[in-house]
Amino acid sequence: MTPCRVPARRTYIWIAMLLCLAVAYCGSHATANEIRFSRDVRPILAEYCVQCHGPDEQHREADLRLDIADASTAAAIVPGDPDASEMILRLTAEDPDIRMPPPEMQKRPTAEEIDILRRWIAEGAPFEGHWSYQPIRRPDVPSPRGAASTDIDRFVVAALEKNELQLAPRLDRRRLIRRASFDLIGLPPSPAEVEAFVNDEAADNEAFAKVIDRLLQSPRYGERWGRHWLDIARYADTHGGSAIGFKRFPFSYTYRDYVIAAFNADLPYDEFILQQLAADQLDLPANDPALAALGFLTVGMQFRSVHDLIDDQIDVVTRGLMGMTVACARCHDHKFDEIPTTDYYALYATLASSEPPEDLPVLGKPSLTDQLRNYQDKLEKRQTIYRDMVRDQTEVMRNRLRSQVGLYLTELAKRVPEQDLSAAFLSYRTDDVRPVVLHRWRLYMRTLSEQDPVFFAWVRLQDTPEDQFQASCEQLVQTLKAENGDPAKFANLHNMSVEAPKWNPRVLSTLEEAKPASLVELAAAYGQLFADVHLDWLTALRDASLEATPDEQIVTDEDPRHAEINSAINQQLRRHLYEPGTPTDVPDNVAAKLLNRTVKDKLSGKRGTIHSLHLNSPGSPPRGMVLTESATPPETRVFLRGNPLSRGEPVTARFLTAVAPHDSTPFADGQRRRGLAEAIIDPANPLTRRVIVNWIWRHHFGLGLVRTPDDLGTRGTPPTHPQLLDYLATVFAEDDWSINKMHRRIMLSDVYQQASVENPAARRRDPENRLLWRMPRKRLEMESMRDALLAVSGELDTTTIGGRPFDLETNPVVPRRSVYAFINRDIISSLSSTFDGADPTSCTVKRPDTTVPQQTLYALNSAFIQDRAAAVAKLAVDAADADADRVDWLYQRIYLRRPDKAERDLAIGFVTRPQAEGDAADDDTATDRWTQLAHAMLASNEFIFLD
């Protein structure tokens, strides 16, 4: 039989198709035999499908969900048959009416991505729960064929071997100690420290372990890693949001100093979180320095709206500590992750019950110096002046409110809608309606029943049609008067034994006379009555007070002249004006915000003198920016579409359902923040330890095992080494949540100590270095670059620790570490904007990483760098007489190595080159040459980057 031959042209087509498929498979993270939902499929669905077919039930299209398997999924996916699956048909359709994603989204999956989906469906379309919400389990440590010194290396090397890759060679000791020093303390090692490590005869890891331990014991360590944490905490020294000027925090620095001290003490991370969320609820002494930890919540942007303030706190807690973008659920269920709006408002209820107290606690016990005495004297005087004015003016306002009952009842009668009470920047006059007071009346009237002896008419008639109102009111009055019986029974009101009738006679008389024909007229009648009651009471108080003055006649307590005071009928009325909790009995902290514009401005000025004293007095002691939590917080409801005036179902303060699906226990009132902190550090929480070990790893390697460290959700990237991530999270708990021990584990690994050399073959196989076949090169961060320049020039002050910030913009040469510099939310420094500093307006888990011309221009033209070059050049000139020795000194000082012959000859040739014609050869010209040489070295990549 003649074998069947395929025409040559068809053969070429099949070969081309196979080659295309091979390329697609090689480019994918999936292998030809393995498709995993979490790793391969979920990112594709998150990019193209889940926004419309995900957790957000309210906005879900076609009632179809594609991020999990549920009853609706069968409409789009036929397991085992991709060609019959509607999802594949829609993704590949050219007809814009049926194509998915819709054309207006302006994105389509690639052929490679569609192929992954087809293969997944062909394999049965198995779904998996999202990896970050799965419990942390200690994985088995692999046994690679190649050398691996630690468990970390075994995970990494095993993954490399699967892809026919290997680690880069070990870094030499000179560059390794430089890498470690910058990683742990943000400063270069001294030449003497380098030589000591290079000449240490101990084995490599034994010698390096001594270096690591020394660096971890240095106070500089807390300054370096504290700065990393301050990025997360969106630390700044100003409130932010000022259109003109800016307002400073007097005590923001106490949080910064707390963070630095916590890292230096290797405070266990779970305790670190607990203190930052609930230090005031841990039974600490009144002046414990750990109270400053609450700055994590309070040092953020000071928004005008309390809702935005709480949103910022929710974001820093969830994104910063757990890698969850919960703030996305403020207006609707999260588009991509299992975070309903009820979860968002459960956290809102947790944090809304706390606010800063009027007086912040002093931290520690400062010595009673003359400066402190002077501060205390001025503070007491200014606070007394402020309190006197607040006391009197708020009492004046309360009494005016008692004369304005009719004003507020009329607003309610007009059905004026609720207002957002977070607008605390309004300006008032005496006759203005204050929204807070109106809201208090609204809530108060809802608590009253038809049996109330004073407001019975309001409760019974508030929904009566206007054409029936007057008749209904007259009939009600006559009926209740009859129920009261003979008025003579209520004579002799000066007698305190006479009780009031069931229905207040003064109210009945007022309504009988006024004959209100609408709810608005009823409000006016009540208003006039209460205004009279209030004025009569003030008059009676005046008269009774005069009786106690010298030479005045004493009147007995049940004298008829005391009828106004003793009358049980009047007491019924006054209950609604003076009883604690009534609308006009406004608490002091609320009343101070409701004063008239002129009074409020004057009080603001007096409060400003106190603020200025805290900020500027040399005797001002450090204070903690704490919170106090209400033991009886108000009810919290979901804000529909984020609108505080459109309220949905009530919520309790509790944890996130996606993280703790089986534990919806509400947090205890008065201890809500502590409940939140304990839920975050609970060993069963799968997120917190994964996030922190990934954060530590990222600051050592430049990239995390999860490349999206602030989003471990659907839109984030899956971990490059998922088993290694869980291994690190497991041993982190076994090491008592010690960050220092995690540093040691990571830095003693081969993968950390490998060089950053390029490998073209490895680059072709793994272009993004996801498998860590080399150590990524890193540019020094802004703070390390500045501090290193000061260190090599011999100017850095490492003895002054903590305290108030210095102004880096005004005087960039202040020789203190950059972590202590003043950070202005309103005006970002040019240095920070040029070199990718953290954005202090929000939680920054990962700084941007840019390479722009301005960075090179700064290195070449900055007066700061030029001055440091002059300083280090002078040290070189003073250190040696011979040019060759000076060059060697500069190389050791700046690059921590000796120059090779070509470098030495080039440098000497530069500093000794003949002068231009007409230039005088003098010492100044020679010094300038050395300065120019030092400048070129300080601006070079070898100084700015870490190998």
Image (spheres, rainbow, N blue to C red):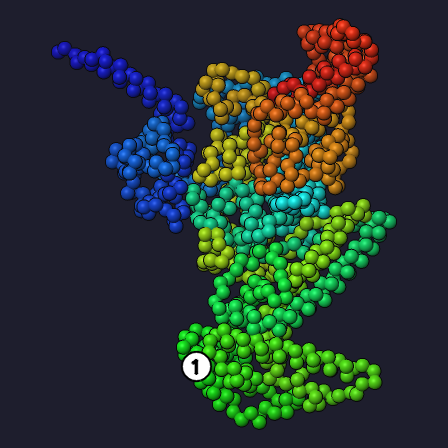
Q: Position of residue 893 (x, y in %)?
A: 73, 19
Q: Residues within 10 Å of mark 1 (few under 14, many from 20)?
A: some
Q: Residue at x 68, y 46 (%)?
A: 247
Please tell me whether residue 646 is drawn above or below residue 220 in the rendered image.
Answer: below
Q: Residue at x 78, y 7 (%)?
A: 918
Please tell me whether residue 903 is drawn above or below residue 509 in the rendered image.
Answer: above
Residue toward you, 310 or 324: 310
Please tell me whether residue 602 is drawn above or below residue 860 in the rendered image.
Answer: below
Q: Is residue 300 visible?
A: no
Q: Which residue is mark 1?
A: 472
Q: Residue at x 48, y 30 (%)?
A: 720
Query: Viewed as shown, does residue 402 lie left or right of 525?
Result: right
Q: Is residue 934 visible?
A: yes
Please tell me whether residue 689 is drawn above or below residue 645 in the rendered image.
Answer: above
Q: Position of residue 616 (x, y in %)?
A: 77, 46
Amino acid type at circle 1 is: Ser
Q: Position of residue 444 (x, y in %)?
A: 54, 70
Q: Quadrant of the N terminus?
A: top left
Residue toward you, 883 or 319: 883
- Image quadrant in which you'd find residue 795: top right
Q: Residue at x 75, y 23 (%)?
A: 867
Secondary element under disc 1, as helix, strand or loop, is helix
Q: Position of residue 830 (x, y in %)?
A: 65, 32
Q: Quadrant of the C terminus?
A: top right
**Residue positioned most to the left:** 1
Query: Viewed as shown, does residue 468 lie left or right of 619?
Result: left
- Image quadrant in which you'd find residue 730: top right
